[in-house]
């Protein structure tokens, strides 16, 4: 499957949440904590080629995801995504290790999921700020962003890992992983 998305930084999520309620969007999930671990080969071939191999844990669910290199169409990012639910994040990590992959970075976020007019709206709170991700049919993405009071031209191209790495260059005292302080 090809995922098409826009990721827009916002000052806070409450105003977007209130607008989603007002326009009749359906909440799919309340806020849930996510722990994401990216895996790569020892030579860093996945990351250097723009691909990602991720294990995500959300509550008692575990997901394994492959993402291909991104291509851009204006503010919209397109990339191949293959995702499957697995019985255990620990077991899939063990399998990946046996195949020559190792964890190279972990990142956390708190995500609340909505759907409006066929577009999935993710409200993400991360250690580096708040973001709204819109995923769905290309013709609806920018219109949905505007309906939510967002400017598609403010979309960021970087993944959360890319944003974290840029943040760490400005704050070298931070650790490798993008995690919330306990």
Image (cartoon, grey):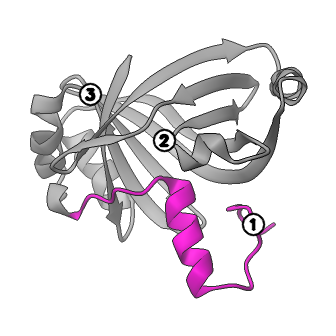
Task: Mark 2 vs mark 3: give the one in front.
Answer: 3
Disc number placed over residue 136 in the picture, else none: 3
| Separation of residues labelled 3 and 1 (CA atoms) | 31 Å
Where does label 2 land, which residue? 112
Task: Mark 1 vs mark 2: give the one in front.
Answer: 1
Rendered-image quadrant of the C terminus: bottom right
Q: Is residue 181 magenta?
A: yes
Per the rendered image, the range of residues in magenta is 154-182
* Residue 127, horizontal then vertical, whole percent: 60, 66
Disc number placed over residue 45 in the picture, else none: none
Residue at 69%, 84% in the rendered image: 172
Secondary structure under badge 1? loop
Task: Mark 3 vs mark 1: give the one in front.
Answer: 1
Rendered-image quadrant of the N terminus: top left
Secondary structure under badge 2? strand
| Separation of residues labelled 2 and 3 (CA atoms) | 16 Å
Query: Foreground: 10 or 26?
Result: 10
Does label 2 or label 3 sit earlier along the sequence? 2
| Separation of residues labelled 1 and 2 (CA atoms) | 25 Å
* Residue 154, horizontal then vertical, whole percent: 22, 64
Query: Foreground: 79 or 153?
Result: 79
Does label 1 or label 2 sit earlier along the sequence? 2
Dot 3 alpha-carbon crowd within 10 angstroms: few under 14, some 14 to 19, many 20 or more: many
Where does label 1 land, which residue? 176
Query: Foreground: 88 or 26?
Result: 88
């Amino acid at each position: 499957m090809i995922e098409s998305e826009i990721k827009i930084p916002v000052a806070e999520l409450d105003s977007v949440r209130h607008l989603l309620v007002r326009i009749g969007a359906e909440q799919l999930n309340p806020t849930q904590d996510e722990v994401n671990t990216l895996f790569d080969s020892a030579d860093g071939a996945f990351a250097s080629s723009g691909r990602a191999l991720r294990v995500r844990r959300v509550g008692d669910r575990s997901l394994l995801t492959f993402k291909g290199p991104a291509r851009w169409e204006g503010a919209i990012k397109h990339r191949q995504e293959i995702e499957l639910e697995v019985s255990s994040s620990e077991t899939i990590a063990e399998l990946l290790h046996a195949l020559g992959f190792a964890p190279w970075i972990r990142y956390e976020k708190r995500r609340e999921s909505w759907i409006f007019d066929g577009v999935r709206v993710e409200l993400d709170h991360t250690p580096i700020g708040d973001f709204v991700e819109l995923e769905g049919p290309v013709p609806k993405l920018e219109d949905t962003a505007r309906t939510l009071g967002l400017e598609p031209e403010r979309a960021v191209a970087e993944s959360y890992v890319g944003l974290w790495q840029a943040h760490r260059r400005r704050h070298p005292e931070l650790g490798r992983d993008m995690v919330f302080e306990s």
